[in-house]
């Protein structure tokens, strides 16, 4: 969201800068007695708005689109940002250690795929939960779920997180 | 510290821009919602059938537009918008990176500053050399009299994450604090796990 905000900010700021400067130039152009427009076809826009009522389809549709864009923008900005780091235990008050949440799912998947009997794995990190889905090529997967669960729990415990996510492991048998 | 909270915001190199973007885009959202909503309500007859049937630019609007001050106000508004946009763009370039910082806290004893790269290069080189670390970067942020050391390490999964966190804190960060004689230097360590495990060749 921060990156999206940044891209939007640069685009909108550039647009506003051009629009603001153009407005000043157009007014100055008219003020010195020049006829017609300099760059922006504002006379064409004004003519359109002089011939269309507030209830005409294009005007209502345009207003609805503007309102919807505003609503989406507002809701996105008001949405609480998910913290990017999971805190790691530290005894030092001047020290903050965090693990990137997004990379944790990659790390979990890689670690799960390394467990004996597992050929591939994926992981999803939620707010307080981590879900690992592991695929095994073994014909008999009896007890494998418990084994993977224990291995992954030990792996998560080794991260030393302040609030480790609650782990759920699902083992699926690869279709032969 | 970290024990009081289970989650932390990710390191932000442009905190000023992040704040400014958020409130400016929120404000813009409110303005668009209000303007678009009012226009749509007018068009749908919420303010009476007479208003609904008016053209968007009617004689009353044209009368105002014909006054001399109207275009002066429009130009002034355009100028304000352009200036606002210019400052908004400039904020995007302002990072919190610290080029140098004060080594001497007591100004009466003179002023000694140190280039941040002298510390950050040493820290990132040390951390990058650890087995299990694929890549490391370090930078100083904050103010010259209250700097913060930021270390980011990408781990390749060959070593336990907790062990590497302890090593970064206990060795690289401790060495930097010792070298600077700043045992209380605020430090932030961000660990990232690499997507693929690199084969152990070290």
Image: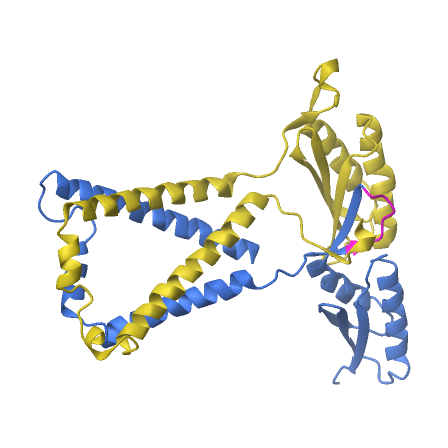
Give the colour of chain B. yellow
Residue A22 image point, x, y percent: 25, 45
Quarter-of-image position of residue B7: bottom right
Q: How many marks?
A: 0
Image quadrant for the C terminus of chain A?
Answer: bottom right
The stretch in magenta equals A87-93
Q: Position of residue B182 (x, y in %)?
A: 81, 29
Q: Is residue A83 left or right of residue A153?
A: left
Question: Residue A106 falls in which quadrant of the image?
Answer: bottom right
Q: Does A25 appear above or below A87? A: above
Q: Main secondary structure of the magenta part?
A: loop
Question: In front here: B54 or A12?
Answer: B54
Q: Point out the image quarter for the N terminus of chain A.
A: bottom right
Residue A131 falls inside the magenta stretch:
no
The quadrant holding residue A134 is bottom right
Chain corresponding to blue in the figure: A
Nearer the observer, A173 or B177: B177
Q: Position of residue B183 (x, y in %)?
A: 84, 32
Residue A43 is at least partly visible in this image: no
- Colour convention: by chain
């Amino acid at each position: 969201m921060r990156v999206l905000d940044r891209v939007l900010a640069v685009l909108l700021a550039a647009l506003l800068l051009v629009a603001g400067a153009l407005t000043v130039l157009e007014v100055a152009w008219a003020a010195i007695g020049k006829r017609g427009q300099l760059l922006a076809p504002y006379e064409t826009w004004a003519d359109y708005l002089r011939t269309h009522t507030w209830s005409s389809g294009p005007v209502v549709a345009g207003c609805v689109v503007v309102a919807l864009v505003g609503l989406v923008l507002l809701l996105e900005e008001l949405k609480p940002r998910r913290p990017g780091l999971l805190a790691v235990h530290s005894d030092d008050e001047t020290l903050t250690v965090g693990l990137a949440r997004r990379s944790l799912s990659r790390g979990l998947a890689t670690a799960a795929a390394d467990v004996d009997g597992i050929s591939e794995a994926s992981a999803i990190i939620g707010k307080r939960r981590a879900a690992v889905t592991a695929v095994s090529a073994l014909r008999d997967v009896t007890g494998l779920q418990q084994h993977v669960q224990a291995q992954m729990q030990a792996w998560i415990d080794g991260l030393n997180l302040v609030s480790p996510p609650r782990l759920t492991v699902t083992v699926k048998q690869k279709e032969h | 510290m970290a024990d009081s909270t289970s989650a932390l915001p990710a390191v932000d190199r442009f905190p000023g821009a992040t704040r400014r973007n958020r409130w400016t885009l929120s404000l813009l959202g409110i303005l668009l919602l209000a303007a678009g909503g009012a226009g749509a309500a007018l068009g749908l007859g919420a303010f009476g059938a007479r208003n609904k049937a008016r053209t968007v630019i009617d004689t009353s609007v044209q009368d105002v537009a014909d006054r001399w001050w109207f275009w002066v106000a429009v130009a002034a508004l355009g100028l304000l918008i352009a200036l606002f946009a210019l400052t908004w763009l400039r904020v995007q370039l302002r990072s919190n990176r610290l080029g140098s910082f004060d080594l001497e806290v007591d100004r009466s004893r003179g002023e000694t500053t140190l280039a941040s790269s002298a510390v950050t290069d040493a820290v990132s080189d040390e951390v990058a050399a650890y087995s299990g670390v694929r890549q490391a970067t370090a930078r100083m942020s904050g103010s010259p009299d209250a700097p913060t050391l930021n270390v980011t390490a990408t781990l390749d999964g060959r070593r336990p994450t907790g062990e590497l966190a302890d090593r970064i804190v206990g060795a690289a960060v401790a060495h930097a604090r010792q070298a600077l004689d700043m045992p209380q230097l605020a430090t932030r360590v961000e660990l990232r796990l690499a997507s693929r495990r690199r084969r152990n060749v070290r």
